[in-house]
Image: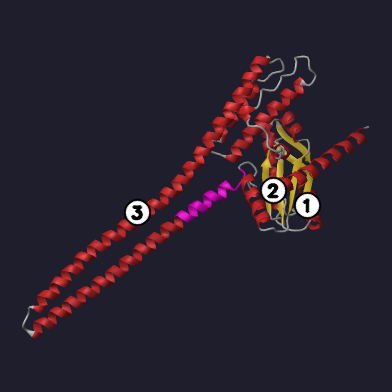
Amino acid sequence: MISIRKYLLAEEPAMAESPAPDLPKADDALLPQTLVAYRSALANMGRCSVDACPACGPDLERRLGEVAQRIKKDIPAQEMQAVDAEVKAELQHWGRLTARHYQQKAGEVKEILLVMAAAAAESLGERDRRYGVHIQQVTDQLRRIGNLDDIAQIRDSIEKTALELKSSIKRMAAEGKAALEQLQQKVEDSQLKLEDAEHIASLDVLTGVRSRMWIEAQIKQRIAAVEQFCVAILDLDDFKKVNDEHGHLVGDEVLRQFGSELRSNGRAVNGIGRWGGDEFVVVLDCDLRQAKECMERLSAWICGNYTVEAPLGSVKLRLNASIGLAQFKPPETMKQLLERADAEMYRQKTAASDSESQMRR
């Protein structure tokens, strides 16, 4: 699970400047749990990289998965340091590729607009040259009429020239209208493509809910407008246990079904997104009291029994989620708002864990 708590930590030192952590001794009781947590973090980082950039993320996910397979209980300290350096290098490489990818996409959009503008200018220039030649011919013909002496010839020539000029103007108008309609159609087609691209970018690839980038933008807009709204953070309880017992494919299917339930039953809220791992964020345009009522209803609908198809047959699971709610209090920042919601979510998760432990006793 990639926690929002880690995202919200204030001003951490740069990765390149951070000293390598001291590795625990081989007989340290915490070593197995530490290595399991490290492997799980690598898997979650890989999945989140796919969400952030579907074009570049799969390769990083595969590489981090290969690194995770090499982390065993008896791994030597020297090799673990090499693994740490390799993970850092892979993340930095993925960051550069992702930045280059989105720069390229922005360049493609600009190129489309430039090609459209050039085509329009070329079309207009060619038409203007063609009709410029024709108008010059009409002008020469009018000069020749001026040299005529016979009134009948003058009248016939003027009528013929007027008809030609009228016909040329009508063709110019028709061609201009067609060129304008063609250009307008190209603009509309490009706009539809851009809207499709923006829609795809705004969705989480795995679950189908909104992406983290989209949710962040929604929160920032409301803060800038000083609007009344609340943020809810949902974190699936014991999700790591699902991955450990049934594998990540089953875990992904659980997230996919949970996201589908959120979308189906969360129409009353104003934004549902996946923050990362098994954490989701909900935006509600209301006060805290109304938000609590809404999230209680939503929790009753989305938490419960789930059936997931696995390679060895159906797996029946019961899913619960800890929910932290916070109402925006000007002039706080998005970080401060999410920090309060995150703290409330962890308070609920701890209380639920303590209650379960007492019941087992």
**Which of labels 1 and 3 is toward the front?**
3
Looking at the picture, tell me which residue is in the foreground, 224 or 135: 224
Residue type of the residue flagged with mark 1: Met
Cα distance in 3D space between marks 2 and 1: 20 Å
Residue type of the residue flagged with mark 3: Ala
**Which of labels 2 and 1 is toward the front?**
2
Question: At x 60% / y 42%, what residue is drawn?
Answer: 205
Circle 2 residue? 334
Rendering coords of residue 97 (x, y %) = 52, 35
Residue 199 among magenta residues = yes
Q: Earlier in the sequence, mark 2 or mark 1?
A: 1
**Which label sits on residue 237?**
none
Q: Which residues are magenta?
A: 190-204
Cα distance in 3D space between marks 1 and 3: 53 Å
User: For the image shown, how many numbered marks are present on the structure?
Assistant: 3
Local crowd at mark 2 within 10 Å, few (<14), some, or many (≥20)? some
Circle 3 residue? 118
Circle 1 residue? 295
Residue 85 in view in this figure: yes
With 73 as the anchor, is 165 left or right in this view?
left
Instruction: Kindly state the secondary structure of the residue where label 2 is placed.
Output: helix
Residue 321 among magenta residues = no
With 119 as the anchor, is 242 left or right in this view?
right
Instruction: Kindly state the secondary structure of the residue where label 1 is placed.
Output: helix
With 264 as the anchor, is 105 left or right in this view?
left
Rendering coords of residue 159 (x, y %) = 17, 80
